[in-house]
Image (cartoon, grey):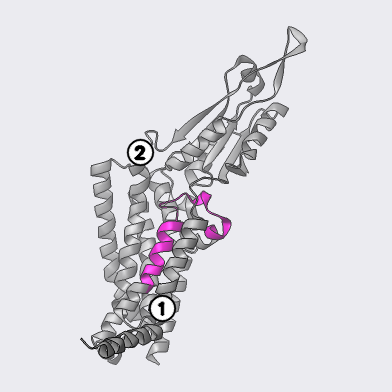
Amino acid sequence: MSWRRLWAIVIKELRQMRRDRITLAMIVGIPVIQLVLFGYAINTNLRGLEAGISDQANTAGSRALVMDMLATGVIAPVARADTPEGLMAMLRRGDISVGVVVPPDFERRRIDGRAVAQILVDGGDNTVQGAAVQLAQVPIDSSIADSRAPMISTPVEGRISIVGFYNPQRRSAVNIVPGLIGVILTMTMVLFTAIAIVRERERGNMELLIATPLTSAELMIGKVLPYIAIGLVQTSVILALGRWLFVVPISGSLFDVYLAAGLLILANLTLGLLISTRAQSQFQAMQMAFFIFLPSILLSGFMFPFAGMPKVAQWLAEVLPLTHFLRLIRGVMLRGAGLGEMWVDVLALLAFIAVMMAAAILRFRKRLD
């Protein structure tokens, strides 16, 4: 073995790696991304859960109880309702994760030693139910005067009950299986289209396609359409297996399930096309797609609770299509909500599709010029 020739190969690989910006970014970027995500953004201790308050008693004692719950930091009030039914509608739409109900006879219940409040929880996420236990342990410190002896006060312990909806048995599969639809579609659809244009260029077919009367938009859309059918087949397989093996319910409309899946498929395909127009090789395309997978899985709320992340991480997650899809699919399958009730996430996916498709077409035309 010649050490000189061996050293020449090493130098050649280092120089080639230095010229390959994607590989260089992977070397530095992956450790940095994982360190930041796991050390800063990922937090299993839930804080700031979106909560709705329905204080029907509106007494000094009931207001003190609500303030004590807010002081724990577990919940953050985002809405108020006059009745428990209003909180249930918010839970169904996904506007809140926790609802606090204080009945009109709060003071009488406190004197009698009965349950003084009720916590309504979206049980689709087991971590949210676990966080609600902290709220139920909030003490009621106010003392109540004994009517038989006005000058003597007798402290009375209050009790707070927890009612979990949409997953009363607290089965993890009910929460995970709908999310797996989004994760699998993200991994496959982005990767398929990320190598689509690059593959044509590497095989020498791009020149033939350019010579045809095809426009850039027609070529892009033609690349996307076959994979839409593939994505819907994958969705059907996951739904069937989830129903058969794990008895995962589909409380809402099956049409809404497929419509939400179709929006995610289009979002991922257009993102993959944009990657494909920028990558120089199939290997580069796969590397760039990997940069999408890691934040999508970790920040979307699939593996870790969304509410536990800092605000900066939540803002970043709002850019990812998987984040909006998880809200839609869990809302439809677990809570029986319609897509019209979650129109904000639908519009977010449509806007993402439009932006990615326009950027991919412009980038493709630029490369042709």
Quadrant in the picture for the N terminus: bottom left
> Vertically, is 134 above or below 241?
above
Tell me the element at label 2.
Answer: loop
Of marks 2 and 1, which one's residue comes earlier in the chain? Answer: 1
In percent of width and height, residue 362 lies at 44, 83
| Residue on which disc 1 sits | 24
Residue 307 among those drawn in magenta: yes
| Residue 258 located left or right of residue 153 | left
In percent of width and height, residue 67 lies at 67, 36
> Vertically, is 323 above or below 22?
above
At a point 52% along the width and 45% down the height, the residue shown is 46
2 vs 1, front mark: 1
At label 2, the amino acid type is Arg
Q: Can you see residue 87?
A: yes
At a point 44% along the width and 77% down the height, the residue shown is 358
| Residue 78 located left or right of residue 228 | right
Residue 208 location, quadrant: bottom left
In percent of width and height, residue 262 lies at 35, 61
Magenta stretch in the rendered image: 288-314
At a point 36% along the width and 75% down the height, the residue shown is 273
Q: Residue furthest left?
A: 1
> Vertically, is 60 above or below 175?
above
Tell me the element at label 1.
Answer: helix
Label 2 and label 1: CA atoms lie apart by 43 Å
| Residue 349 located left or right of residue 153 | left
At label 1, the amino acid type is Leu
The chief SS type of the magenta part is: helix
